[in-house]
Amino acid sequence: MANRLLDTWHRLQRWPAGDWLFSRAVCFKAPYFATIAPRITRLEPGRCEARIRHRRKVTNHIGTVHAIALCNLAELVAGVMTDASLPGSMRWIPRGMTVEYLKKANGPMHAVATPDVPLVEASEGYDLPVGVVVRDRDGEAVFRARIAMWVSPRPARQG
């Protein structure tokens, strides 16, 4: 079964700056993510990657990338990965997130989201834990998150 979000990603990859266009479209749909100006760089079933630059908008009082900017980045990649991995008959919503701040976050950040268990089409809802690791420019993990997604069938349309 085709996935509209994944189809849009593939269609925009044919254009120069297609990942930028896709990222802007995601931020238009979910405006709060625009506060971190993410660039989604890879999207496939079971994986989403994105980057943010280290700029004043995401910096805290000690000059590092702010903890909440890292949380926003984690929720973004987890949500986009989940959405791109599910058939159109399923929906999702985040239920909670646990995070670990491993070291000071300096420089550009690169996040990768992957599910802990396979995503499946189901007749009833289920928990889907999604792991996210954010690394700095040297490839060192600075942040880890586990996002609890609730996946369930879409209600049948009436009328």
Image (tube, helix red, strand yellow):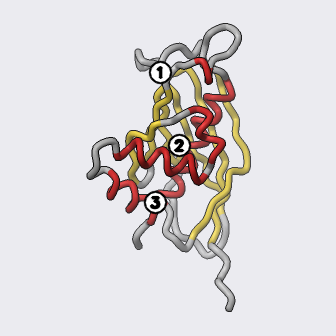
For residue 4, above or below residue 51:
below
Q: CA distance from mark 1 to mark 3?
A: 26 Å
**Which of the two discs, 1 and 3, labels the residue nearer the N terminus?**
3
Q: Which of the pair 67/140 is nearer the observer?
A: 67
Q: Position of residue 119 (x, y in %)?
A: 51, 59
Image quarter where the C terminus lies is bottom right
Q: Which of the pair 102/29 is nearer the observer?
A: 29
Query: Which residue is the site of mark 2?
Result: 77
Q: Position of residue 80 (x, y in %)?
A: 52, 50
Residue type, label 2? Val
Q: CA distance from mark 3 to mark 2?
A: 13 Å
For residue 142, above or below residue 119:
above
**Which of the two discs, 3 and 2, labels the residue nearer the N terminus?**
3
Query: Which residue is the site of mark 3?
Result: 5
Q: Residue at x 55, y 19 (%)?
A: 55
> Helix or strand or loop: what does disc 1 sit on?
loop
Mark in front: 3 vs 2: 3
Quadrant position of residue 122: bottom right
Crowding at label 3, few (<14), some or many (≥20) Cα neighbours within 10 Å? Answer: some
Q: Do residues under tags 1 and 3 come within 8 Å of each other at their CB atoms?
A: no
For residue 52, above or below residue 26:
above
Query: Which residue is the site of mark 1?
Result: 108
Crowding at label 1, few (<14), some or many (≥20) Cα neighbours within 10 Å? Answer: some
Residue type, label 3? Leu
Q: Position of residue 100 (x, y in %)?
A: 65, 25
The residue positioned farthest toward the top in the image shown? 62
Q: Residue at x 44, y 51 (%)?
A: 46
